Image (cartoon, rainbow, N blue to C red):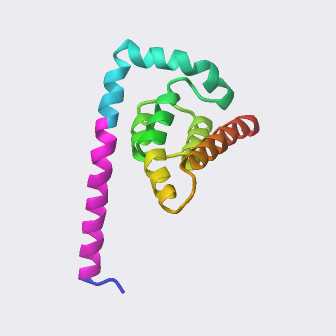
Amino acid sequence: MVTAETFKRGVNKGLSTTWELTKVVVPVYIFVTFLSYTPILEWLAKACQPFMYYLGLPGEASLALVMGMSINLYAAIGVMTTLALTSKEVTILAMMLLLCHSLPMETAVAKRTGVSGSFVVIMRLILSLISGLILNILM
């Protein structure tokens, strides 16, 4: 049964979560938009294009991968919103990030459980790349 207290707590948690996401997504969105007016993003896209071709992604998507793997998924989402991606490209990018996101933070957590940090990073990177290649072939 939904009471006024439950509703109030839900609204507060929803607003808190929205604020946390906004603190990450908006600055990344502004940063990437700024980069799009400089030659840096174009240079990065051209440098990554040959590799990204095998994953079925445009070169610009490399920035989303780097942000997602190094910071978190919300940073990657901020980058993805600035790109004109097809549904196939979004699916491939989302699957790759699902398997390989927030590497520094999650590797630290894994190490505290006794797992080798380098093993975790290497396996997640390999699985992410394999999933991108397979999805590109299948879709």
> Is residue 74 rendered to the left or right of residue 86?
left
Give coordinates of residue 102: x percent, y percent: 46, 47
- Residue at 68%, 42% (x, y): give it: 131
**Residue 62, visible in the rendered structure:** yes
Number of dots carrying numbers: 0
The residue closer to the viewer here, 96 or 13, is: 96
The relative height of residue 7 versus residue 50 in the rendered view (above or below) is: below
The relative height of residue 84 versus residue 106 in the rendered view (above or below) is: above
The relative height of residue 106 versus residue 42 in the rendered view (above or below) is: below
- Residue at 26%, 60% (x, y): give it: 15
Give coordinates of residue 26: x percent, y percent: 30, 40
Give coordinates of residue 121: x percent, y percent: 57, 45
Query: Which residue lies most toward the right here?
Result: 138
Name the image quarter holding residue 104: top left
> Is residue 50 rendered to the left or right of residue 17?
right
> Is residue 52 rendered to the left or right of residue 137?
left
| Quadrant containing the C terminus in the rendered view | top right
Query: Which residue lies most toward the bottom here?
Result: 1
The residue closer to the viewer here, 58 or 124, is: 124
Name the image quarter holding residue 67: top left
The residue closer to the viewer here, 61 or 103, is: 103
**Residue 84, visible in the rendered structure:** no
| Quadrant containing the N terminus in the rendered view | bottom left
> Is residue 72 rendered to the left or right of residue 30?
right
**Magenta region includes residue 13:** yes
SS assignment for the magenta stretch, majority: helix
- Residue at 75%, 39% (x, y): give it: 138
Q: Which residues are magenta?
A: 5-27
The residue closer to the viewer here, 23 or 139, is: 23
- Residue at 47%, 60% (x, y): give it: 112
Name the image quarter holding residue 9: bottom left
